[in-house]
Every structure is written in C-alpha cells, then in structure tokens.
Amino acid sequence: MMSASSRRNWQVFFGALFITGILSVAWLSRVDFIDANMLVPIRHTAQLAFAIYILILVARPLQQLLRKPWTAKLLRNRRLLGVAFAAVMTTHLLLIAMRFGSQPELTYPLGNLLVGAGAYGIFYLMLITSFDGPTKALGRRRWKILHNTGLIWGGIIFGLPRSVADLSDPDYLKLGIPFLLAIVIRFIAWRRSIQRDSSRSPA
C-alpha cells in the first residue's frame, strides 16, 4: 500500500506537471509555431523551476536564522518543493525536446548537453529518493550526498555566469542576484551554527 507521503508526492508531481504543461500548450496553441514563441514557455518553466530551487536552497538556513512559523512550514514542505521542481523541469525538458524535434537544423553544444543530461540524471534520482522506500534503501548518509550534489549542480546550471558578459546581462542578473543572496543566507546560517557549537564546547 502506498504511504500518505508518497501519495502527496505523486499528487504534487502530476499537479505541477499538468499545470505547467497546460499553460505551455495553451500559449503555443494561440501563437505562431516559430522558435521565438517556443522559447517563451521554455524560459518561463526554467524561471519557475529556479524560483522553487531558491526556496529549497534557503529553507533550512532561514529556519535556523529566524525560527518563525512560516520558515518552519517552508522547511517541512521542502521535500514537496523538490518534487514540484522535478515536475516543472520535466515540462521544461519536454518543451526543449519539442523545439529540437520540430527544428532538426538546430544544434546544441556538446558541453551544455552533457551538463544538462547530468543535471537531469541527478534531479530524477533526487525525485526517486523523495519517496520513503528508496530513501530508506539509500541510507541517510548517501541520501545527503546525493541531494547536496543536486543542490550544487542546480547552482551551476541556474546561478553561475557562463561568461564575464553575463554579469551585466539583465536576463542573467534576474537569476544571479537571488542565487547570490541565497548563498549569503546559507553562509550566515553556517557561521551561526559554528559559533553556537563553539560556545557550547567545554573550555
């Protein structure tokens, strides 16, 4: 029998997949089927996935720093946020496949392809291990390694500039600045935890 947490995971996954898929199809059905229009839902799904990623990234450090009811709720729902992230990224992947399938002349740099394929591999492993059975089978230590690796890989994809020119590009800054703030929040929380541990240590 499926557990209650697993049912919630599937509900969130298919709900997010359905909503982002329907909105993307609705957009594409009312515009000309050209590359510029196909890029619109591709960008929007990437931006939505990034917003969810940022929430996942700051959930624990915000709770450590603020300890408010809303930060506690955010942390409790971090696993569901991860499931929603995987669903939105699935829609994003399907839109990319549709774009390249409809335009065979398009090419994709091999380096970007390898990084993207690796990211999706990790993201789907993270999705699988968001369910109770695989989580127990993997073990706590390996689970943490996998999910921390996924967070780092997500940062490489979403947050790091591809070139120096990106640092002055408004499209990049919409991602880069929130990512930098999230890293600062995590660093502050880490420093506070180190200081607390030091103060509790016997002299």
Image: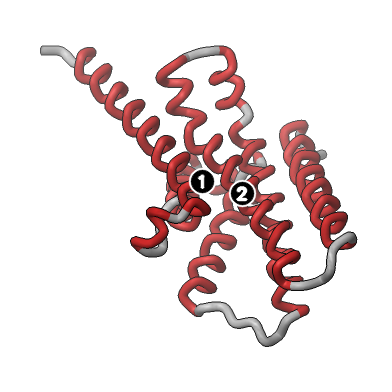
Residues tagged 1 and 2 counted as in contact (Cβ below 8 A): yes
| Nearest to the observer: residue 73 or residue 147 | 73
Amino acid type, mark 2 = Gln
Q: Earlier in the sequence, mark 1 or mark 2?
A: 2
Above-or-below relation of 67 to 101: above
Q: Residue at x 84, y 68 (%)?
A: 32
Name the side, left or right, on which 167 lies relative to 132: left
Mark 2: few/some/many CA within 10 Å (<14, 14-19, 20+)? some
Q: Visible in this render: residue 158?
A: yes
Q: Residue at x 31, y 23 (%)?
A: 193
Residue 88 locus on image (x, y percent)? 69, 50
| Nearest to the observer: residue 95 or residue 125 | 95
Q: Quadrant of residue 196?
A: top left
Residue 91 locus on image (x, y percent)? 73, 57
Q: Residue at x 48, y 14 (%)?
A: 67
Spatial CA span between label 1 and label 2: 9 Å
Q: Residue furthest left?
A: 203
Q: Visible in this render: residue 141?
A: no
Q: Which residue is mark 2?
A: 47
Q: Residue furthest bottom?
A: 105
Q: Quadrant of residue 160?
A: bottom left
Image disc number at residue 97: none
Amino acid type, mark 1 = Lys
